[in-house]
Amino acid sequence: MNTLATRFYLAAGIFALCGMVWGIQMSATGDHSLSPAHGHLNLIGFVAMAVFGTYYALVPSAAASKLGSAHFGLAIVSVVVLIPGIARAISEQGEALAKIGSILAVLSMLLFVVVMIRHRKPV
């Protein structure tokens, strides 16, 4: 497996572990107020990273591209900014971080679509 796919899978695993620990903490305390942030961590942090990793494992030319590497960086930053941003917004500490993280997440997905278009195989 190529390095980029491995990095996405590793990130997915780390985000999944964080989500699991956070879920256990919410269950233990009975405080589920941040569950929307928890859900986004699991969906974007784990599921999306795993999907990205699978694509890059199956399409090595995309994994070897500069856009693929840029996509990894943008995807990671989007999760790292978005999840605390959602938590802050829920806690009424401001929405700016959530808005920035949301924009970064959309840009990350847009970049992924560009990578897929550029590296599509002819039918």
Image: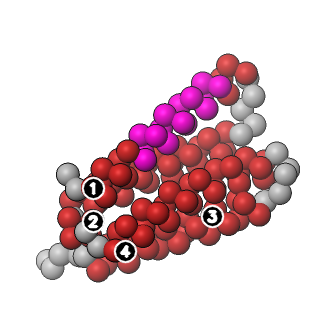
Q: Which residues are magenta?
A: 11-25
Type of amino acid at the residue the image marks with label 2:
Ala
Q: Is residue 97 rendered to the left or right of residue 59?
A: right
- What is the number of the mark on residue 102? 3
State the colouring used for the structure image. secondary structure
The three-letter code of the residue at mark 3 reads Ser
Q: Are marks 2 and 1 in contact (CB under 8 Å)?
A: yes
Residue located 75% across and 28% down the image:
31
Label 4 belongs to which residue? 67
Residue 3: which disc? 1
Q: Residue furthest right?
A: 92
Dot 3 falls on a residue whose secondary structure is helix
As shown in the figure, which amino acid type bears the numbered disc 4? Leu
The residue that appears at 71% across and 54% down in the rendered structure is 85
> Is residue 82 in the magenta section?
no
- Residue at (35%, 69%) from the top-left corner? 68
Q: Residue furthest left?
A: 123
Q: Quadrant of residue 70?
A: bottom left
The image quadrant that residue 5 belongs to is bottom left
Q: Classify mark 1: helix, strand or loop.
A: helix
